[in-house]
Amino acid sequence: MTPEQRHRCMASIKGIDTRPEMKVRRYLHGLGFRYSLHSKRLPGKPDIVLRKYHSVIFVHGCFWHGHPGESCYRKPSTNVEFWEEKIRRNKERDAADVAALEALGWHVIIVWECEVSKKRFEETMSGVVKDLHNYLEVEHIHHIPPSVRRLSNQDSSEM
Ligand SMILES: [Zn+2]
């Protein structure tokens, strides 16, 4: 980091933005991951696009995207049908986006709002990082010519 970058980094830490998406971004950036944001050219405009890892991350709000967890989903007591219908449509769209992205060869990771709570953040993010590394490794294995793969299969019984 240059002094200028460090200065900006410190400044942004002071005015810390605690939105789930920002927490995820900051964490990945701190580990040296580089990404683009809300790529309009991709289905669903993923929040974080990690080109090198052929992966995209959506950071979903539990309510809007219908996360069924006990601790996250707060059902409004009025207009129940209206909200249920709206959330059902959001979930349908999310599923269609994931399918479209996967069809284009992207690996899709969903991070839920409730998973980035103070208690669960570290665990969630180390899982995401592991997932990214694993995916890249698997991709590389797939790109090895079949003859080489056959040889390396002999000592990959742990997979
Ligand atoms: Zn949730």
Image (spheres, rainbow, N blue to C red):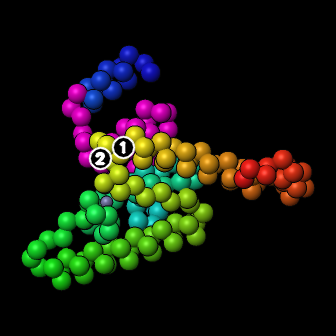
Circle 2 packing at 10 Å, graded few (<14), some (14-19), many (20+), is some
Residue bearing mark 2: 117
Spot occupied by residue 116 in the image (x, y as percentages of width and height)? 33, 48
Residue at the far left: name it: 78
Vertical arrangement, residue 19 with respect to residue 75, above or below: above
Q: What residue type is labelled 1?
A: Phe
Q: Visible in this render: residue 25?
A: no
Vertical arrangement, residue 156 with respect to residue 17, above or below: below
Circle 1 packing at 10 Å, graded few (<14), some (14-19), many (20+), is some
Which quadrant holds residue 71? bottom left
Residue bearing mark 1: 121
Range drawn in magenta: 14-39
CB of mark 1 near ligand 1 (< 8 Å): no
Ligand 1: which quarter? bottom left
Q: Residue at position x 56%, y 60% from top? A: 106
Q: Residue at position x 86%, y 58% from top? A: 146
Spatial CA distance of label 2 from label 1 is 6 Å
Which quadrant holds residue 105? bottom right
Q: Does the magenta stretch include residue 23?
A: yes
Q: Residue at position x 45%, y 75% from top? A: 96
Quadrant in which the N terminus is drawn: top left
Q: Is mark 2 on a helix, strand or loop?
A: loop
Asked if the residue under mark 1 is in contact with the one under mark 2, i.e. CB atoms within 8 Å, the reply is yes
Relative side of 45 to 101, left or right: left
Q: Which amino acid does label 2 sit on?
A: Ser
Spot occupied by residue 64 in the image (x, y as percentages of width and height)? 26, 66
The disc label shown at residue 130, or none: none
Q: Visible in this render: residue 2?
A: yes
Spot occupied by residue 63 in the image (x, y as percentages of width and height)? 25, 65
Spot occupied by residue 10 in the image (x, y as percentages of width and height)? 30, 24
Q: Does the magenta stretch include residue 109?
A: no
Which quadrant holds residue 39? bottom left
